[in-house]
């Protein structure tokens, strides 16, 4: 793993996320090594030639770039993070995310946290100091054997569930980001039924077969669920309406069970 300290020119940038105003990414790269990670496109903007998941740049001066005494971000949403995980393992050493959140408290934005790590509970004391804050834990595979292969260094689903319980107990609003949904592998109904007593909102995203990850996903399927290979080829063919049907199922289930939800599905057809 190649870890490098860097200095960045800016840290709060305008967001391209559908529900966000601004975004902060404390790191470049991520050690979780998720095989489906869309953020590997970030390599284009760096000098890294190493495989995605094998390097991280630490924006060591990031906390110092958070402005003081400004109303610019008050009531605006700031999401941490969009193309890295703010609580990946090295956060335990550098505490960069924690320092950034501390600097944001006086600015009182609407803080959105998204992570695959139970390390997030370390900062409950800081989350309590925001008038508007929601913390989302992301997972979609509960089978630990499969999880280790598809997202090697993220926290197990059980640990993420426990983190959601701790956040809920501390009265921090919580979200469970069921992402990415793997057809025939992700049992989103079961996940909701097991967690709805301590999760305030559910977000859903389907697996998007970007060209950069397609070979990795099919390699994973051939090794672990070979019976699904042909099914996935059909799902991601031009004329498939599979994800439209699945989206409607989610909506119906959530409405019937009075579950708050947001859907961030990708519907662009792709030839496999």
Image (cartoon, rainbow, N blue to C red):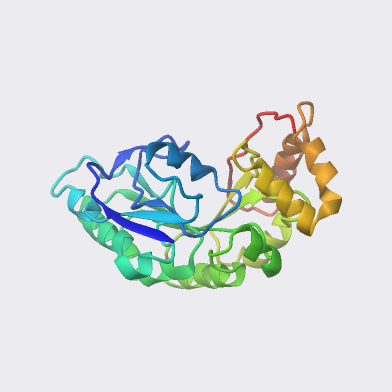
Q: Is residue 220 above or below residue 76?
A: below
- Which residue is most to the left? 69
Q: Measured from the top left, where is residue 181 in percent x and y?
A: 67, 49
Q: Is residue 217 above or below residue 31?
A: above
Locate the C terminus and report the quarter of the image it occupies: top right
Q: Nearer the viewer, residue 150 or 203?
A: 150
Q: Measured from the top left, where is residue 22 in percent x and y?
A: 34, 40
Judge whether residue 255 can be spotted in this image.
no
Which residue is painted at 54% across and 67% down in the image? 155
Judge whether residue 169 can be spotted in this image.
yes
- Which residue is most to the front? 49
Place residue 10 in its image quadrant: top left
Q: Nearer the viewer, residue 104 or 139?
A: 139
Locate the N terminus and report the quarter of the image it occupies: bottom left
Residue 89 placement, left or right of 158: left
Q: Nearer the viewer, residue 6 or 93?
A: 6
Place residue 194 in its image quadrant: bottom right
Residue 261 placement, left or right of 43: right
Residue 165 placement, left or right of 271: left
Q: Measured from the top left, where is residue 72 in percent x and y?
A: 22, 39
Q: Is residue 156 above or below residue 70?
A: below
Q: Tell me how many marks there are.
A: 0
Residue 242 placement, left or right of 133: right
Q: Is residue 235 above or below residue 176?
A: above
Q: Measured from the top left, where is residue 179 in percent x and y?
A: 60, 51
Q: Nearer the viewer, residue 115 or 253?
A: 115
Place residue 192 in its image quadrant: bottom right
Which residue is painted at 70% across and 40% down in the image? 247
Which residue is painted at 34% across and 47% down in the image? 24
């Amino acid at each position: 793993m190649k870890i490098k300290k860097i200095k960045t020119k800016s840290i709060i940038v305008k967001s391209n996320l559908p529900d966000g105003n601004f975004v902060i990414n404390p790191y470049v790269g991520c050690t979780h090594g998720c095989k489906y990670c869309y953020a590997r496109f970030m390599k284009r903007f760096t000098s890294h030639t190493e495989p995605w998941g094998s390097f991280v740049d630490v924006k060591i001066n990031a906390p110092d770039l958070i402005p003081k005494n400004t109303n610019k971000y008050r009531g605006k949403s700031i999401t941490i993070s969009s193309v890295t995980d703010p609580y990946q393992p090295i956060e335990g050493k550098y505490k960069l995310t924690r320092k950034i959140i501390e600097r944001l408290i006086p600015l009182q934005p609407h803080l959105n946290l998204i992570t695959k790590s139970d390390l997030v509970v370390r900062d409950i004391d800081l989350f309590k100091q925001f008038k508007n804050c929601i913390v989302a834990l992301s997972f979609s595979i509960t089978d630990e054997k499969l999880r280790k292969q598809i997202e090697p260094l993220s926290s197990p689903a059980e640990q993420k569930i426990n983190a959601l319980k701790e956040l809920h107990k501390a009265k921090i609003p919580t979200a469970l980001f069921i992402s990415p949904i793997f057809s025939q592998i992700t049992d989103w109904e079961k996940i909701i039924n097991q967690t709805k007593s301590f999760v305030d909102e559910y977000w859903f995203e389907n697996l998007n077969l970007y060209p950069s990850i397609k070979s990795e996903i099919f390699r994973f399927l051939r090794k672990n669920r070979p019976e699904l290979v042909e099914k996935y080829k059909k799902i991601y063919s031009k004329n498939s309406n599979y994800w439209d049907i699945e989206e409607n199922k989610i909506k119906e289930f959530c409405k019937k069970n009075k579950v708050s939800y947001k859907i961030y599905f990708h519907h662009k057809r792709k030839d496999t």
